[in-house]
Amino acid sequence: YDNSVKAIRGSFFDITRVVDHPEEIEAHARLVEDGLLIIRNGCIDWFGQWEEGKGRIPSEVRVRDYRGKLIVPGFVDTHIHYPQSEMVGAYGEQLLEWLNQHTFPAERRYNDREYAREMSTFFIKQLLRNGTTTALVFGTVHPESVDALFEAASRINMRMIAGKVMMDRNAPDYLLDTAESSYLQSKALIERWHGNGRLLYAITPRFAPTSTPEQLAMAKRLREEYPTTYLHTHLCENKEEIAWVKSLFPEHQGYLDVYHQHGLTGHNCVFAHCIHLEEQEWDCLKETDSTIAFCPTSNLYLGSGLFKLHKAWHKQVKVGIGTDIGAGTTFNMLQTLNEAYKVMQLQSERLSAYQAFYLATLGGAHSLGLDEKIGSFATGKEADFVVLDPVATPLQQLRYDNSTTLRDKLFVLLTLGDDRSIYRTYVDGQLVHERG
Ligand code: GUN
Ligand code: ZN
């Protein structure tokens, strides 16, 4: 008897194909009202109608029956800082003051391996109780912080991408490395963790102001030596920040040019925020096949500005959704999508329910180059999924009963939903979170 086999019954919803335009998403939206998912060794072995598939379930396997719920692929968070969980909701500042007053002191504590372990466990629990099964994560400058996080993720075989921050100037001494030490520490972490199980490594210069040109050159060297790693940083978040970059790198054409000239653009290079991009920066992101992480709660919280998601589609630049904890104010992807909708409203643009779910699942996976592995219920993919309770509160029940179409039901779920909507979370075919 093969105890790696699991059978899940319920209503399933996913987007089945990567698209170039948001209008195409609905055509690839799939609802299987009475569906069956068969999992073998953590991967999707069979998916389809219950009636069609029930004969395939081995007789010893108990069916987990989630009828009445809605099962969707696990959410993908394309930008988050795990060492900022303890300072979410810090009052009163925009980016640069916020970093100095709140962020750097919080990150200081991660030189303590025990503390980093405790917080890694906390962080992963937060992801799971919010339905997030894959994340691209900032550590701190301390390599111990990344060891702790990867150790915790590997215990449940979670698909996680993370890296040690590289920063060798313009921050308190206690958080600085050097060009040389950041290279050596990142290299050791890559050797230990990149491609270890489902874990992947992201080379992580914090942002241009906190790296010398020498350190950026080291980041480039790492990328050349390990071309399948990610590059993860921040770009054009705040107007003061952009002016500062221009004064630190006067010989460059702009903010993105600093990264570009250092060989830090390209496939699987992920830039958080990108609110105030110039036209040639949009073009450069497109030409290099780079990715943007759109972080609505953070952008509103820090007063950074409104991301032009419509322009990203127009320019054909890949976008994923990020919570950006701790400048963002929630781990929850439904709440994040709700805020994304409002960011678009403020620009007289729309974010449809289908587009929102796409960005949080297959689109997010695609933005991280993982759409062959996660993001939908295609056979062979990794079995990471969430069982959503669409009627977790009386208000949701009322509103749900008054919705007729799938589009409306999905939209209400992301507008009113939060962690109470996350009934069960599965990673690698295993139940890893149960509500209540
Ligand atoms: N830019 C550089 N560091 C950070 C950070 O920690 N959070 C945000 N939101 N922006 C940054
Ligand atoms: Zn960030």
Image (cartoon, rainbow, N blue to C red):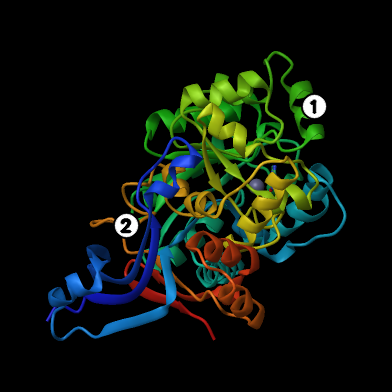
x then y, percent, for residue 27: 39, 47
Quarter of the rendering occupied by the C terminus: bottom right
Front in this rendered view, residue 156 or 176: 156
Image height of 365 relative to 222, above or below: below
In the picture shown, does residue 281 fall above or below 430? above
Secondary structure beneath dot 2 equals: loop
Residue under circle 2? 197
Q: Is residue 285 visible?
A: yes
Quadrant holding the N terminus: bottom left
> 117 left or right of 90?
left
SS type, badge 1 = helix
Depth check: 320 or 351 in front? Answer: 351
Q: CA distance from mark 1 to mark 2?
A: 41 Å
Q: Which numbered marker is on residue 341?
A: none
* Residue at 56% across, 78% down: 391
Check the image and name the residue furthest to the right: 92
Q: Earlier in the sequence, mark 1 or mark 2?
A: 2
Left or right, 98 with respect to 70, comes to: right
Q: Which residue is mark 1?
A: 243
Ligand 1 rendered quadrant: top right
Residue 332 appears anywhere in the view = no
Q: Residue 232 location, x and y as percent?
A: 54, 40
Q: Is residue 16 left or right of residue 333?
A: left
| Rendered residue at 62%/73% (across/down) | 399
Residue at 62% x, 23% y is: 281
**Residue 123 lies in quadrant:** bottom right
Quadrant of the rendered structure where residue 278 is? top right
For this rendering, which residue is in front, 300 or 83? 300
Three-letter residue code for mark 1: Ala
